[in-house]
């Protein structure tokens, strides 16, 4: 069931403006649950094999040579977005993160690279 | 604080389609972005349609995927569509092909009779149950932590509500015959760590919880098989508990006679053992415990923070709420910074673990107005006024405030 409140909201979205809701819906006008779930038949739910492709990311860390260590060591388990979306954090927090990658998650990173990575992170994403 | 998802004007215009929210995008990588109002930044995220079985999602991380549900989806109904249900994986080795004929779920460990179940054994061989339940990431809303903390910088869209269909975990465990002395059941899926020796993602539940008759193994959500990225073909459903326990692509259950020592159970997903999982930054000596039951939350879904409404005229307000580990008792709003509260009208009850819609209207005079919305659950637990803090940004559920201008 599509009701006035939903149509009003859809129209507002369409216009890209917020949001003079049309009308004044009463309690019975709450949007109907949008669901494909029909009460299940007791038998006959059939699962189908699935084959998909997952997108990859070729984003690297900016900064030229200063980013060499992070690009060489921080892109194998997760794409750069994991780090690039992080807020600015204290240098000690970045050091703890790199340490966690090495010790908890078994990232094979030597001390020199770990230091370079922490420096890069506190340079580019350090809490001021 | 602004907490609703704001979509840039350009992206809204780009998205406008016949379905209102059905997003139209030419390229796989949508050329639109969304601004998440995260105080610690960065705020901009791509909107993407590049992921299989998924419509437009907010891209938090490509590999392994972290995809957030655009907040306006929650206004469309009490159930979150599968193709916009959020996605969250820990390790990047995720099978992309699953053959339903050869898939097996094993049950092993401290049992009389180890099992290797086919999907047919599960779908046709065990009683079918259905339950509406909210699935919410432990770190939903982490991006609002102040001071900021590391981890996926979600806004409020790492949650969703679905009608799950499957079998009771209890029935599966009973078929294997749990031996006396068993303590926990441990769950693992088909995903694997990227490097040797790294901790495979696994989670455990106390055996009594696992056998409570509510914990399910789901093979369908909202009437359809699960999208691969939401855990096809089987996913654990732990009603009222955070999603970390809802193991995806579940293919292994071990019954343990000794406490689970694996990294993800013992060292990760810990919260301070304090009311509301709240502590102060740097506080020492805080006892940490595994995250567990969810707490109540509520949101306005039909208006965005910063919107202008008509002064002196009734404006409809509506949204969703959930009680966490109990049902929604009430959803109240306040227009005076939490001094006075008045109830809203609740929508149909889809079960105590489900989202529940609420609705009311406000008629503010000209000027600024802040709307606070608060859910109280049937255990009497209400959302707190101030946001909790802990070093992993878990269990946020403070009262949301929406800043409007009546003109």
Image: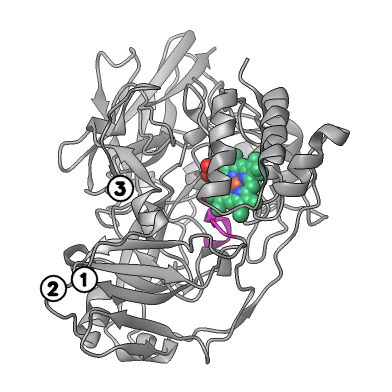
Residue lying furthest right in this view? A64
Sequence-wise, which precedes: disc 3 or disc 1? 1
- Disc 3 packing (10 Å; few <14; some 14–19; many ≥20): some
Q: Position of residue A102 (x, y in %)?
A: 58, 47
Chain of the residue where label 1 is placed in the rendered structure? B
Residue B320: tell me if it is visible.
yes
Alpha carbon of mark 2 to alpha carbon of mark 1: how far?
6 Å
Check the image and name the residue furthest to the front.
Answer: A111
Q: Nearer the viewer, mark 3 or mark 2?
A: 2
Residue that badge 3 annotates? B290
* Residue at mark 1: B257
Residue B77 rendering spot, x and y as whole percentages: 45, 51
Eyeballing the image, is B265 above or below B43?
below
The magenta-colored residue range is B82-91
For label 2, the residue is B181
Q: Quadrant of the C terminus of chain B?
A: top right
Indicate left or right for A32 with B327 as reference. right
């Amino acid at each position: 069931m599509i009701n006035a409140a939903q149509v009003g909201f859809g129209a507002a979205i369409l216009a890209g403006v917020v949001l003079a809701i049309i009308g004044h819906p009463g309690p019975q006008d709450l949007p109907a649950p949008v669901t494909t779930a029909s009460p299940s038949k007791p038998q006959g739910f059939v699962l189908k094999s699935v084959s998909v492709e997952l997108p990859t990311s070729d984003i690297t860390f900016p900064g030229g040579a200063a980013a060499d260590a992070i690009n060489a060591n921080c892109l194998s388990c997760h794409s750069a977005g994991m780090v690039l979306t992080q807020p600015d954090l204290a240098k000690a927090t970045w050091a703890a993160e790199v340490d966690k990658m090495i010790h908890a998650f078994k990232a094979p990173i030597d001390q020199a690279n770990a230091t370079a990575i922490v420096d890069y992170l506190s340079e580019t994403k350090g809490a001021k | 604080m602004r907490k609703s998802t704001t979509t840039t004007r350009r992206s809204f215009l780009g998205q406008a389609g016949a379905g209102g929210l059905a997003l139209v995008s030419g390229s796989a990588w949508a050329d639109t972005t969304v601004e998440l109002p995260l105080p610690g930044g960065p705020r901009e995220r791509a909107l993407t349609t590049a992921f299989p079985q998924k419509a437009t999602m907010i891209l938090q991380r490509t590999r392994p995927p972290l995809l957030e549900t655009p907040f306006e989806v929650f206004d469309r109904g009490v159930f979150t569509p599968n193709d916009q249900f959020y996605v969250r994986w820990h390790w990047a080795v995720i099978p992309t092909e699953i053959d339903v004929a050869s898939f097996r779920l094993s049950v092993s460990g401290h049992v009389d009779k180890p099992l290797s179940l086919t999907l047919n054994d599960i779908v046709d061989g065990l009683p079918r149950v259905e339950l509406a339940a909210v699935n919410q990431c432990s770190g939903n809303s982490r991006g609002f932590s102040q001071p900021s903390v590391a981890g996926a910088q979600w806004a409020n869209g790492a949650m969703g509500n679905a009608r799950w269909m499957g079998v009771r975990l209890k029935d599966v465990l009973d078929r294997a015959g749990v031996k006396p002395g068993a303590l926990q059941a441990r769950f693992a899926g088909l995903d694997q760590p990227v490097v040797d020796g790294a901790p495979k993602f696994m989670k455990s539940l106390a055996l009594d919880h696992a056998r409570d008759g509510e914990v399910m193994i789901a093979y369908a959500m909202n009437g359809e098989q699960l999208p691969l990225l939401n855990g096809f073909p089987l996913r654990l459903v732990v009603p009222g508990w955070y999603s970390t326990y809802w193991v995806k692509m579940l293919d292994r259950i071990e019954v343990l006679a000794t406490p689970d020592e694996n990294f993800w159970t013992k060292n990760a997903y810990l919260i301070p053992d304090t009311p509301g999982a709240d502590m102060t930054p740097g506080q020492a000596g805080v006892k940490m415990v595994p995250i567990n039951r969810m707490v109540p939350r509520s949101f306005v879904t039909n208006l965005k923070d910063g919107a202008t409404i008509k002064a002196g005229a009734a404006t409809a307000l509506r949204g969703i709420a959930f009680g966490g580990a109990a049902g929604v008792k009430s959803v109240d709003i306040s227009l005076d910074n939490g001094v006075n509260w008045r109830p809203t009208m609740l929508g149909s009850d889809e079960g105590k673990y489900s989202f529940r819609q609420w609705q009311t209207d406000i008629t503010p005079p000209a000027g600024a107005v802040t709307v606070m919305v608060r859910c109280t659950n049937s255990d009497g637990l209400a959302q707190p006024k101030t946001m909790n803090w802990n070093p992993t940004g878990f269990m946020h559920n403070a009262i949301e405030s929406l800043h409007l201008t009546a003109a």
